[in-house]
Image (cartoon, helix red, strand yellow):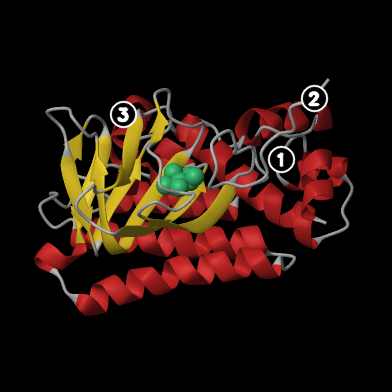
Amino acid sequence: MTQLMPNTDPLKPGYPFNAHLVAGITPIVKGGELDFWIDRPKGLKGYILNLTVSGGGLVFPGTPHERKVTKGDMMIIPTSAVHDYGRHPDLHNWYHRWIYFRPRAMWSEWLDWTEKSCGVGFLSLKKHHGEREIDMIDHLFQDIDQINEQGSMLAEELSLNLLEQILIRCREFDDSKPTSPVDPRIQRACLFIHENIASELSIDELARVACMSPSRFSHLFKKQKEVSVRQWIEDQRIALARQLLITSDLAINQVAQYLGYQDALYFSRVFKKNLGESPREFRQSQR
Ligand code: FCB
């Protein structure tokens, strides 16, 4: 009896994408082994950022949403969004770089591009910008790829940091999107959260820091950050927890305490809910 082995090549169908970040390049050449349609009707568990570096692809073929992508065109495919694409039949190749990732809550504004089709965001670097911008983004993709190949201790942190740069750049390039600068009162509250991450941090206290009523504060926070105050605080704590788990030898209950969780079991549950694995599993997988 043959046992089906899980696919370990992210370029081939059936790869499970269980990691938080996977990056690569898909070099599709006419008639080559990668020359098939990438068709995922239910999407993936995370986001995908895609940049065409040469040749061209066809997205949503045979539908009213069909479109061609060529050098400098980017796509952002959200969690669970249908995607169906492959080499453009008229072109000899389609090379595209991609990053699969689980986004941080505070990125939500940068993930929502103005031009969308079937939930997938599109951004053309060549239309409004030029070769320099394409090169810059291409290099950031390459850096992420290299960091992951080298597998340094802080590979994931570094990759997320570079990915954040790509998303911020894309937000800048997406100039048809209206800018809404963060209200200084909300900024003040965010700074306070960072400085007091291990404290209880009630909405009343944060609203006082922002000089607003608690309900107005919660409402404005959600509007500006696109996540609730509670979720944002949790996100900051998880980001810090990840760093501590990788870079220190603190026991899990010490990490929990450092972040203001009195109950280490509760901390582990919150961590697992956010990242899909317990703090212990996370630390082991990083080492
Ligand atoms: C690869 C595809 C690429 C992207 C990643 C997540 O198999 O070639 O386009 O979808 O998966």
**Type of the residue with mark 1:** Gly
> Furthest residue to the front?
31
Mark pair 1, 2: CA separation: 50 Å
Residue that label 2 marks: 2
Mark 3 vs mark 1: which is more N-terminal?
3
Snapshot quadrant of residue 130: bottom left
* Nearer to the camera, 28 or 6: 28
Percent position of residue 147, x then y:
61, 69
Q: Quadrant of the C terminus?
A: bottom right
In the rendered structure, are the residues bearing label 2 and label 3 in contact, judged by CB atoms less than 8 Å apart? Answer: no
Furthest-top residue in view?
Answer: 1
Q: Secondary structure at mark 1?
A: loop
Q: Residue 180: x and y, percent?
A: 19, 49
Q: Secondary structure at mark 3?
A: helix
Q: Secondary structure at mark 2?
A: loop
User: In percent of the image, x 67 and y 32: which residue is there?
Assistant: 276
Judging by the rendered image, the residue that carries numbered circle 3 is 219
Point out the tag, 2 or 3, that comes first from the N-terminus.
2
Which residue is at 19% across, 38% downward? 116
Q: Is residue 267 above or below residue 92?
A: above
**What mark, if any, has residue 260 been given in the picture?**
1
Residue 6 percent location from the top left of the image: 70, 34
Viewer-proximal residue among 179 and 209:
179
Q: What type is the residue that disc 2 sits on?
A: Thr
